[in-house]
Image: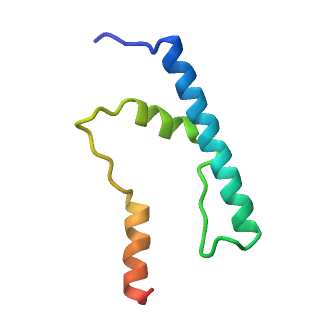
Amino acid sequence: MSVVLPGPDLILQMYGALLRVRMFEERVRELFAAGRIPGFLHTSIGQEATAVGAASALGREDYVRRTAVMATSWRREERCGA
């Protein structure tokens, strides 16, 4: 099995994506703390590389589905009539 390493351009793109994700998550956390976003919040601060790394490996033929945690939350909302 051969390993394909990303080139300098892809590494810079991935780093930019890491920063965008972190900045978004921090802003969302600020808005939630200020009461501007209702409900509950679970950020992925510190786990940005997981999302960026997985997304960078996706091809045009690949699909992304929601996680069991989100599906569970949506089912709970449906039962509660939210």
The residue located at (37%, 82%) in the rendering is 78
Q: Nearer the viewer, residue 44 or 28?
A: 28
Q: Is residue 64 left or right of residue 23?
A: left
Residue at the far bottom in the pictured view: 81
Q: Position of residue 48 (x, y in %)?
A: 57, 40
The residue located at (28%, 45%) in the rendering is 63
- How many marks the image carries: the answer is 0
19 vs 75: above or below: above
Q: Position of residue 4 (x, y in %)?
A: 37, 13
Q: Is residue 36 left or right of residue 41?
A: right
Q: Quadrant of residue 43?
A: bottom right
Looking at the figure, which quarter contains the C terminus? bottom left
Q: Quadrant of residue 16?
A: top right
28 vs 45: above or below: below
45 vs 52: above or below: below
Q: Position of residue 59 (x, y in %)?
A: 29, 32
The residue located at (70%, 54%) in the rendering is 27
Q: Nearer the viewer, residue 68 or 14?
A: 14
Looking at the figure, which quarter contains the N terminus? top left
The residue located at (44%, 71%) in the rendering is 73
